[in-house]
């Protein structure tokens, strides 16, 4: 099963870090194909917690080559900090981490603009992670961005940065900020150059060659389907394409070369930042899910909004990504609730629908089906038979209505707290 794409089926934070880490036990290569330091993927191994932001979640497996592909936007200072953090915790990164020379550089002025636009408690704020991701993609698509390859040539880097900064200067002034000096911008990133230049390669040919050689390659998504700039709850989205098609574009692998697409879904829903969230809970049940599930952003520490699982949204993710299989995470967090609800349809101004009315998502009323809760802790479950009857009934319903078979169910943050339903690299069961 050589090329597998793993994507989030909701609004991010579905547990991609944990699941990619499981897959990479037997992967030769793990490739992050989009996004930037807005991602925060948590891995828990031997009671130690690691949070990776730019580096692929395969980094903990010493035999795996980790690739940051050209669909990404990379803050060189964040990358160096992250590599230092990993090295200081005994994770060897040198020689096994490669970075695309066509990934775009996040400069301090991108971070500045992101922060100025979002402000403190601004009414129309998106609720971004303020890591400069959106402004950097703006530069890329305006064709004035700076690819990391420019780090090889100081003069070229200076010229390209000068041009981009000149475009941003009136915007920064308009937003009430101070335009940084070019020399200061370049000085801020200068110390990262000698660390990053040796890592730069043409990752497209590297990844494509590995796929052609039938190596086990995992294309690791960041964010989630409903944050996709085309398919998400626009404008409350990120600025990239976290859906499966984005893996092909961002890594440079043709769609015919992908063997399987796996979607991750929490047993409930969370969202960080602004935007519609029909199944959101504003009561003590939502608070309890946040507490038990430790639902606080791994990048910003913000409390995540919590709510029930949304089946029309899940089916939408299955279709948009062409999912072959679903991995369900955080089922254990629902333990102890009297009842577990799941949204099966919405009431809209045009009547009831089981589809996703993205254009009126902010005003729909969810229709719920209620399941009996369970009290047993699930962390020890290693097969479906180990789960309480009520949890199985809930999962059976989600699998049937989600219209996609499960490949695994995660019942805790640690590697082994997982019910594996089939070999991740074995023959796939078609949707
Ligand atoms: P990602 O961005 O999709 O990688 O997800 P995050 O790492 O931001 O958030 C998921 C959180 O849930 C992390 O703290 C994980 O350690 C944790 N987690 C993952 N799977 C499970 C699970 O099955 N049960 C519990 N309780 N926690 C989990
Ligand atoms: P992982 O990979 C959850 C959200 C932000 C905001 C919107 C735009 O950990 O699942 P941005 O900084 O990207 O311009 O913010 O997208 N967002 C995420 N939410 N998990 C993420 O990544 C996210 N990356 C971006 O909260 O609503
Ligand atoms: Mg996350």
Image: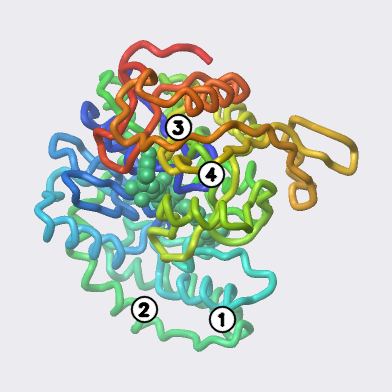
The mark found on residue 241 in the picture is 4
Q: How many other residues sit within 10 Å of disc 3, few (<14), some (14-19) or many (≥20)?
A: many
Label 4 with label 1: CB-CB less than 8 Å: no
Residue 23 to residue 223: above or below: above
In front: mark 4 or mark 1?
4
Q: From mark 4 to mark 3, how far is it between C-alphas?
A: 22 Å
56 vs 261, left or right, is left
Marks 2 and 3, how far apart at CA? 43 Å
Precedes in sequence: disc 4 or disc 3: 4
Q: How is the image coloured?
A: rainbow
Using the numbered discs, state the Cα–Cα distance from disc 4 to disc 1 in whole angstroms.
Answer: 26 Å
Helix, strand or loop at mark 4: loop
Cα separation between marks 3 and 1: 43 Å
Earlier residue among tags 2 and 3: 2
Badge 4 or badge 1: first in the primary sequence: 1
Relative placement, left or right, of 399 versus 257 is right
Q: In terms of image quadrants, where is residue 219?
A: top left
Q: Which residue is mark 2?
A: 185
From the viewer's perspective, tell me whether residue 310 is left or right of residue 185: right
10 Å crowding of disc 4: few (<14), some (14-19), many (20+) = many
């Amino acid at each position: 099963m050589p090329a597998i794409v793993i994507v989030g089926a909701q609004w991010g934070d579905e547990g991609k870090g944990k699941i990619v880490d499981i897959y990479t036990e037997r992967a030769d290569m793990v490739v992050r194909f989009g996004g930037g330091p807005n991602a925060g993927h948590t891995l828990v191994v031997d009671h130690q917690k690691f949070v990776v932001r730019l580096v692929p979640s395969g980094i903990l497996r010493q035999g795996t080559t980790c690739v940051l592909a050209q669909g990404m936007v990379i803050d060189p200072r964040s990358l160096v900090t992250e590599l230092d953090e990993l090295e200081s915790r005994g994770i060897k990164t040198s020689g096994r981490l490669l970075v695309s020379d066509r990934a775009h550089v996040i400069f301090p002025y991108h971070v500045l603009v992101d922060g100025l636009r979002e402000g403190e408690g601004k009414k129309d704020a998106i609720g971004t992670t303020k890591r400069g991701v959106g402004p950097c993609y703006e530069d890329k698509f305006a064709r004035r961005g700076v690819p990391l390859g420019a780090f090889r040539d100081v003069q070229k880097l200076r010229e390209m940065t000068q041009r981009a900064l000149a475009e941003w200067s009136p915007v920064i002034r308009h937003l009430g900020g101070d335009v940084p000096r070019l020399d200061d911008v370049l000085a801020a990133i200068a110390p990262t150059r000698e660390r990053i230049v040796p890592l730069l390669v043409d990752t497209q040919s590297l990844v494509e060659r590995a796929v052609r050689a039938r190596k086990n390659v995992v294309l690791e998504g960041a964010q989630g389907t409903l944050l996709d700039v085309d398919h998400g709850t626009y404008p409350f989205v990120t600025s990239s394409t976290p859906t499966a098609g984005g893996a092909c574009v961002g890594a440079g692998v043709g769609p015919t070369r992908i063997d399987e697409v796996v979607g991750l879904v929490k047993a409930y829903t969370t969202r960080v930042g602004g935007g519609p969230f029909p199944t959101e809970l504003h009561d003590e049940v939502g608070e309890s899910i946040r507490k038990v599930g430790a639902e606080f952003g791994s990048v910003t520490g913000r409390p995540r909004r919590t709510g029930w699982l949304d089946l029309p949204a899940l089916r939408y993710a299955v279709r948009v990504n062409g999912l072959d299989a679903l991995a369900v995470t955080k089922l254990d967090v629902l333990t102890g609730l009297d009842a577990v609800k799941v949204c099966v349809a919405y009431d809209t101004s045009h009547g009831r629908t089981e589809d996703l009315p993205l254009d009126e998502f902010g005003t729909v009323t969810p229709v719920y089906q209620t399941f009996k809760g369970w009290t047993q802790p699930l962390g020890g479950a290693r097969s479906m038979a180990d789960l309480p009857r009520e949890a199985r009934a809930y999962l059976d319903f989600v699998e049937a209505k989600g219209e996609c078979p499960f490949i695994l169910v995660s019942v805790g943050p640690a590697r082994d707290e997982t019910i594996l339903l089939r070999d991740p690299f074995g023959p796939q069961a078609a949707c």
